[in-house]
Image: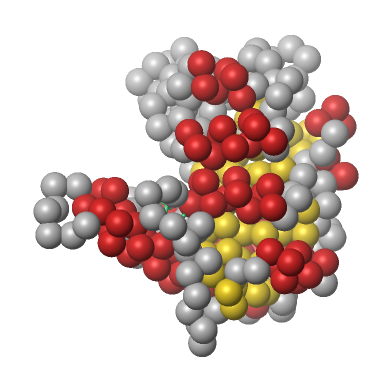
């Protein structure tokens, strides 16, 4: 999450609660046209979800926390494809910056492999709860995971398996946000859920600006015009082109993944007709 939309969990303001005409967080909003009707979602979880705040690597406590929430959401019958990030281990652009002995493409491949490590951890955590999963990778690695094949992925979803999609798009120079947008489109998801450590999209950094407003809803154009870095630019553009709604919400708040999957109003919804408060 970039400038203009950060918040801490303990953000003193929760402007969404004061917006006239806007549902309160956690309140179902049938006007979304998603709500209980969402049959299939793509859930993007960044690497930061796999580790305790401020740390690096993988913490199985943190992974289990995500797994429990996802499992509960899946029990409502919603098909869930998780796209996994790798920033808790390595991000290609950061790793290669100022480092002349590694090609940036190599660093991006390293980043994609990091997402596979997270994917393996997530798979075991979800399965420890008794739920069937499939880990699928865009970069083939037989013996570790299935290759990502769109039709096979859909079949797993139809059979009620949670699918965990790792190694992004399989190509360097993009991020797992773009992979999430791509998968949401090709799997015909009803919505792309972007789980982050902040409450949604803000007008400004609320830690620096006490008047920063948490948006309940935005249009793709709002996001682009104000340069709100909700997801990477390419991901937002793809979603805009194909009218794929995006919900940005805070996964650290217990129950939020379940709420988001079930279509309750949490965080910031971005769609064609979105409007600022
Ligand atoms: N990556 C890539 N191609 C992809 C997806 C990811 O090259 O399709 C690399 C990229 O270097 C990225 C890293 O993998 O920085 C980890 O993914 P990301 O930064 O999206 O993780 P997150 O920030 O969501 O934890």
Q: Tell me the quarter of the image containing the C terminus.
A: top right
Give me the residue at 60% from left, 49% from top: 182
Please identify the quarter of the rendering in which residue 134 is found: bottom right
User: Can see residue 76?
Assistant: yes
Q: Nearer the viewer, residue 218 or 141?
A: 141
Whether residue 80 is situated above or below residue 22 in the rendered picture: below
Give me the residue at 85% from left, 27% from top: 31
Residue 213 position, x and y percent, is 53, 17
Q: Is residue 33 left or right of residue 5?
A: right
Colour pattern = secondary structure
Residue 206 position, x and y percent, is 43, 23
Residue 103 position, x and y percent, is 22, 57
User: Can see residue 41?
Assistant: no
Residue 154 position, x and y percent, is 76, 64
Whether residue 21 is situated above or below residue 148 in the rendered picture: above
Please identify the quarter of the rendering in which residue 217 is found: top right
Q: Is residue 140 left or right of residue 34?
A: left
Q: Tell me the quarter of the image containing the N terminus.
A: top left
Whether residue 172 is situated above or below residue 243 in the rendered picture: below
Numbered disc total: 0
Q: Is residue 246 left or right of residue 39?
A: left
Give me the residue at 51% from left, 87% from top: 143
Give me the residue at 54% from left, 28% from top: 201
């Amino acid at each position: 999450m970039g400038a203009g939309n950060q918040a801490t969990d303990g953000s003193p303001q929760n402007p969404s609660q004061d917006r006239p005409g806007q549902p309160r967080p956690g309140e179902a909003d049938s006007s979304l046209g998603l709500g209980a009707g969402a049959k299939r979602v793509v859930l993007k979880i960044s690497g930061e979800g796999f580790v305790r705040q401020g740390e690096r690597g993988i913490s199985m406590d943190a992974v289990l926390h995500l797994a429990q929430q996802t499992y509960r959401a899946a029990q409502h019958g919603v098909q869930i494809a998780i796209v996994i990030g790798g920033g808790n281990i390595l991000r290609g652009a950061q790793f290669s910056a100022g480092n002349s002995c590694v090609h940036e493409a190599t660093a991006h491949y390293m980043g994609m492999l990091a997402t596979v490590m997270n994917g393996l951890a997530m798979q075991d955590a979800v399965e420890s709860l008794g739920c069937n999963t499939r880990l699928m990778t865009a970069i083939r690695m037989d013996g570790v995971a299935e290759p990502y094949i769109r039709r096979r992925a859909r079949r797993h979803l139809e059979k009620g398996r949670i699918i965990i999609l790792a190694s992004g798009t399989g190509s360097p120079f993009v991020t797992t946000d773009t992979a999430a947008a791509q998968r949401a489109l090709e799997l015909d998801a009803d919505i792309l859920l972007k789980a982050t450590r902040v409450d949604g999209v803000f007008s400004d950094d609320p830690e620096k600006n006490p008047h920063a407003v948490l948006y309940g809803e935005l249009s793709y154009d709002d996001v682009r015009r104000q340069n709100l870095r909700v997801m990477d630019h390419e991901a937002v553009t793809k979603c805009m082109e194909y009218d794929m709604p995006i919900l940005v919400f805070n996964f650290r708040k217990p129950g939020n993944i379940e709420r988001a999957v079930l279509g309750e109003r949490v965080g910031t919804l971005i769609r064609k007709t979105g409007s600022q408060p």
